[in-house]
Image: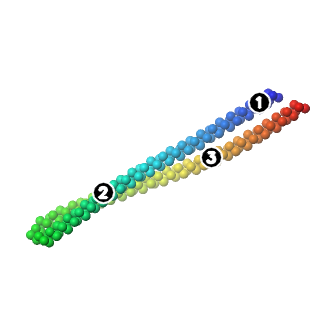
Amino acid sequence: MENEMMQILHKMNEKMDNLEKNMNERFEEVNTRFEEVNTSFEEVNSSFEEVNSSFEEVNTSFEEVNASFEEVNTRFEEVNTRFEEVNTRFEEVNTRFEEVNTRFEEVNTRFEEVNTRFEEVNTQFSEVNTRFDKVEGKLDKIEAKLDGVGEQFELHTESRMNDFDFISDKVFKLEKDVYTLIKNSNN
């Protein structure tokens, strides 16, 4: 009888070891999922840094555009001064018109530069939009992984409850068997 008790206890110990092993494996799976989610968050953070860098580039381009507009404004002021000189100095009209034409060419060149810079800004905005699309895609992946973690947690909890019920039933049966053995040994 003592041998039977030892066998029962030994079997019970083996089942507890198996249960502990299963629970450790499940905890490792959950930890792996959390590491994947953490990696995804790091990727999103990196994408945000890239977007921030793009915004800085756009800001620099706007500063350059602003400087170009200031130059254009200065050129227009110079042209206006030249026209005033044309009104006061009729003898120098031909010479001054050549200077005005030169200045207008410079202004046109500046406008072309401004247009080019606006095209660059538009291109950078397109890149920013593309990066935002990538960020949204990564956020969708994170959300899917988080859903997987939730489902894994629910399965884990359900498994723990099933394992607890199984162990409770086994312990109850063992207690019943022990009680029956003790009762039979007393008789």
Would you name the residue on which mark 2 appears? 64
Q: Image quadrant of residue 133?
A: bottom left
Q: Nearer the viewer, residue 43 or 86?
A: 86
* Circle nearer the N terminus (2, 3): 2
Spatial CA distance of label 3 from label 1 is 35 Å
From the top left corner, tell me how far across and down residue 184 is, in percent: 87, 33
Say whether residue 58 is visible. Answer: yes
Residue 153 screen position, x and y as percent: 62, 46
Tag 2 near tag 3, CB within 8 Å: no
Query: Which amino acid, mark 3?
Result: Phe
Residue marked by disc 1 = 7
Amino acid carrying label 2: it is Glu
Crowding near the residue tagged with mark 1, few <14, some 14–19, many ≥20 C-alpha atoms within 10 Å: few
What whole-number distance in Å separates the C-alpha atoms at marks 2 and 1?
A: 86 Å
Residue under the point 17% across and 67% down: 82
What secondary structure is marked by label 3? helix
How many marks can you see? 3
